């Protein structure tokens, strides 16, 4: 029997803690299954289909219905999902939640096999800006896509591949041969970060070693393979971390945590009556977004216009809808590092489990301004969602996001938010489990209100 208000509050907090950590495990599972951007999009599309979203083919004529739920893909690595209100009000426009599917890693080059002594390594190219030394001495594997012949030479088929076992590592040089390693050593991107995948013997055949390994994991014929986009990924799984399991340690938190929370926010939002809610996860943010499937293209703008015209609106009405739209750009944010406090702003530091960071930059490397931040403050009124301001220390240039890029193409109000985290771009990153839950709840409020 509950005797007082404090006991009731304690019980409510306990149940909330259980819910938050359960959701944290969901996020970890999604990340563990998403070894490449292609797998991210495949996992998103599976979730969408399970929730009765209809897949559209970009090459075909669309037929959209009021009250409908739809999704489609671009290059197998960018995905857009949207819901159409029953009675669309032009003045409500589009509500857009944007994230990205890619993470820093290593892309495997063509003809990758390289033998030194009796050791076989794979030739790779650095993708994005990883913290290179964090990839050393870890169990690694391969994931990506294989392109095979189809009926139309301009439309070959894509087959995803993921080797779910530790097959290689990038070994460090022993300290006895590198005495200055703890004082900081330059890492050669062409030589030092090539993963060891096998040892040769008398029966060893170097030619197409990787292709043969891939063929053991997919049901296709060698003669059908045309090319591949394969990446090295960190095989170790994510986990809850800390004495009270209050943190998450995992690869790819940047930015798969945002992808999963945004997608679930779209599902969990209250019934959409009068607007178009849209979730987009772009590829190639980590290399500048200037690709056909990246944020620095007209892909999203063209998609919004296509949706509006297909629903019977004219171009003038579409432009009016754009002016009434709003975008929430969700990407990782920096938490204050306890050993490097001087790297963070004196009064606007991110703290784990203290709320989502509203990312602000005078140089507009983030899109947030007083107007868009005010929208977020009103969205969370009456909820348990916490927010905090984040500004880079003035001597640190900081990073950027898809927010400013997309807002430039669309010309709409936008805000940049992120989960505060440590070790951004490491092979394993760390964040607070409550902050990820707050982002999912914010996505739900974002799609429900307005």
Image (spheres, grey):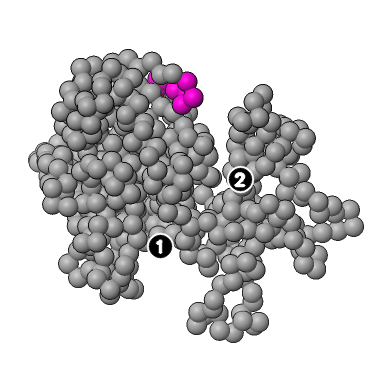
Residue at 22 percent of width and 27 percent of height? 316
Residue 82 position in % (x across, y down): 34, 28
The residues bearing labels 1 and 2 have C-alpha atoms spaced at a distance of: 27 Å
Q: Are marks 1 and 2 in contact (CB under 8 Å)?
A: no
* Magenta region: 51-60
Q: Is residue 65 above or below residue 128?
A: above
Q: Is residue 45 magenta?
A: no
Task: Identify the mark nearer the N-term, 1 or 2.
Answer: 2
Q: Is residue 223 above or below residue 289?
A: above
Residue at 42 percent of width and 57 percent of height? 429
Given the current orientation, which residue lies at the most extreme right position?
A: 202
Is residue 30 rendered to the left or right of residue 403?
A: right
Q: Is residue 6 above or below residue 271?
A: below
Residue 116 position in % (x across, y down): 77, 67
Residue 436 position in % (x across, y down): 32, 46
Question: Quarter of the image containing the C terminus?
Answer: top left
Residue at 77 percent of width and 50 percent of height? 209
Secondary structure category for the residue under label 2: strand
Residue at 46 percent of width and 42 percent of height? 292
Residue at the disc numbered 1: 423
Residue at the disc numbered 2: 229
């Amino acid at each position: 029997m509950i005797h007082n208000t404090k006991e009731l509050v304690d019980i409510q907090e306990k149940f909330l803690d259980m819910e938050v950590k359960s959701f944290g495990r969901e996020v970890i599972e999604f990340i563990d299954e998403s070894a490449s951007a292609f797998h991210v999009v495949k996992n998103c599309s599976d979730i969408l289909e399970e929730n009765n979203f209809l897949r559209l083919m970009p090459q075909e004529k669309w037929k959209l219905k009021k009250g409908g739920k739809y999704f489609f893909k671009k290059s197998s690595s960018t995905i857009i999902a949207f819901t159409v209100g029953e009675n669309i009000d032009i003045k409500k426009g589009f509500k857009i939640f944007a994230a990205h599917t890619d993470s820093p890693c290593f892309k495997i080059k063509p003809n990758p096999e390289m033998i030194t002594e009796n050791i076989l390594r794979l030739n790779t190219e650095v993708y994005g800006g990883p913290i290179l030394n964090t990839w050393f001495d870890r169990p690694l594997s391969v994931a990506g896509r294989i392109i095979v012949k189809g009926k139309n030479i301009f439309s070959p088929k894509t087959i995803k591949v993921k080797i779910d076992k530790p097959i290689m590592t990038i070994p460090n040089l022993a300290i006895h041969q590198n005495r200055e390693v703890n004082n900081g050593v330059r890492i050669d991107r062409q030589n030092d970060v090539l993963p060891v995948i096998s040892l040769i013997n008398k029966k060893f055949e170097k030619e197409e070693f990787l292709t043969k390994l891939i063929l053991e994991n997919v049901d296709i014929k060698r003669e059908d393979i045309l090319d591949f986009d394969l990446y090295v990924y960190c095989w170790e799984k994510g986990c809850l971390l800390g004495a009270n399991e209050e943190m998450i340690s995992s690869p790819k938190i940047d930015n798969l945590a945002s992808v999963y929370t945004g997608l679930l926010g779209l599902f969990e939002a209250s019934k959409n009556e009068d607007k178009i809610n849209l979730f987009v996860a772009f590829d190639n943010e980590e290399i500048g977004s200037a690709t056909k499937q990246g944020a620095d293209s007209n892909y999203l703008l063209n998609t919004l216009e296509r949706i509006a015209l297909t629903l019977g609106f004219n171009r003038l009405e579409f432009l009016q809808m754009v002016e009434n739209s709003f975008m929430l750009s969700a990407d990782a944010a920096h938490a204050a590092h306890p050993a490097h406090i001087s790297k963070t702003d004196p009064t606007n530091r991110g703290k784990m489990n203290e709320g989502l960071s509203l990312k602000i930059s005078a140089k507009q490397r983030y899109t947030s301004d007083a107007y868009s931040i005010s929208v977020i403050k009103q969205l969370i009124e009456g909820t348990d969602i916490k927010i905090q301001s984040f500004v880079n220390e003035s001597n640190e240039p900081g990073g950027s996001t898809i927010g400013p890029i997309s807002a430039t193409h669309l010309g709409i109000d936008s805000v940049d938010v992120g989960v505060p985290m440590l070790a951004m771009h490491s092979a394993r990153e760390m964040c607070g489990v409550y902050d990820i839950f707050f982002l999912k709840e914010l996505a739900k409020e974002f799609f429900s209100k307005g």
